[in-house]
Image (tube, rainbow, N blue to C red):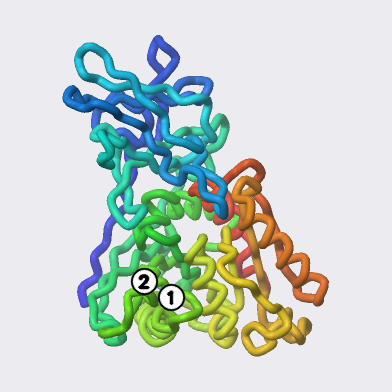
Amino acid sequence: MTRLFMLLALTPALCLAQSPADSGPAPSNVGNAEYPRIHSDLRVTFRIEAPEARKVQLVPGMGRVENNGYNGLGKDPYDMVRDDKGVWTVTTPPVVPGFHYYWFLVDGVPVNDPGSETFFGFNRQTGGVEVPGPGVDFYLPKDVPHGVVRIQPYHSRITDTVRTAYVYTPPDYDANHDARYPVLYLQHGGGEDETGWTRQGHANFILDNLIAEGKARPMIVVMDRGYARKPGEPPRQQWGGPASTTLEEVFLREIIPMIDARYRTIADRDHRAMAGLSMGSGQTFQITCRNLDTFSHIGLFSRPPDQDIELKTVFGGLFIDAGAFNRRVHLFYWNAGTAEPRIYQTGKALTGALKAMGVDTVWVESPGLAHEWQTWRLALNDFAPRLFRKP
């Protein structure tokens, strides 16, 4: 099968142009769009032309969610104000830096902002705004050697569909033909797809920067779709949660063998990791813990409290023999934002209970961040340097 290669140019230039009014277009705007505009105090002004509308609101993508905290753009919809030309405007209070989904509600109808790029989230193309944080550049493209993100289609016999993996190869991959690399399988969250970790998460730039600084080992990163069901399998099982093993089968029987055959991997468990965010962390937990002969590094970012876990019986009593688990798993990493209440509290409690059982875990929290991409960017930036360090 022919491989399609592309140097990732999936995000607009990430810079903040200042105007005399001390605000500038968001780096996520399309073309020369002036709005949304980011103010120096991190307020954001949104605008949309809708002369026939009677009511327009700005809706933060997450809003109030009990389990997940809220979007750093705000907790509730903002009412917008119409001028005499039919242009509706609102300026938010200062927001949390990072990437935030949003849309407009025009007379009750969800509408994406024509001034912003769209990203696959909430199971559809959804608007998003990037709010740069002062002095925060670990996920921005820098003047360093860049890896390549390759689009790798393949036919899945299990699902009888054509699936697509996004495969990051490190900067020296095409020049150093004798080198082989460890692999990180990196999963997106619910309502998103295999483009999320590059489009919203900038995983490729995070890895480029870490590798250039000597903080992370050069590695291949595979980002695949987190939904899989066999012909005739009910749609409710497509999420790959405990009720379905289809995604697990696709990984073990198709994705991993394909990657090992087509890329220069170090094809053993000591050099294979899996991590994911939200829904993807639940999938990671299930797939890795059921297959420790395949994986030795595990990363759970914002693992949802979707079920009660009995640590002494889950996965056939895997954690009872903590010593055996610790010898097989080189890294068992958990991360959550402190502003995603139940996820944070549940994760902290579970890792505490695991440690009490003697299981080696790493717990890292992101202060003030909720269930959104800035949390997961930070998690990857902290997780990747820890990988593949054991001889």
Q: Taking the image as drawn, is residue 17 in sight?
A: no
The answer to whether mark 2 and mark 1 are in CB contact below 8 A is: yes
Report x, y in % for residue 54: 24, 26
Amino acid at circle 2: Tyr
**Residue toward you, 45 or 214:** 45
Report x, y in % for residue 103: 33, 39
Residue that numbered label 2 is attached to = 227
The residue positioned 46% from the left and 33% from the top of the image is 131
- Local packing at callout 2 (Cα closer than 10 Å; few below 14, some 14-19, many 20+) is many
| Circle nearer the N terminus (2, 1) | 2
**Residue toward you, 3 or 111:** 111
Amino acid at circle 1: Gly
**Residue toward you, 58 or 166:** 58
Which element type, helix, strand or loop, lies under badge 2? loop
**Which quadrant of the structure image shows residue 353?**
bottom right
Q: CA distance from mark 2 to mark 1?
A: 6 Å
Q: Hey, which residue is sitting farthest left in the picture?
A: 52
The residue positioned 46% from the left and 21% from the top of the image is 39
The residue positioned 42% from the left and 37% from the top of the image is 130
Q: Height in image: 350 above or below 97?
A: below
Q: Is residue 383 left or right of residue 14?
A: right
**Which quadrant of the structure image shows residue 90?**
top left
Q: Height in image: 353 above or below 204?
A: below
- Local packing at callout 1 (Cα closer than 10 Å; few below 14, some 14-19, many 20+) is many
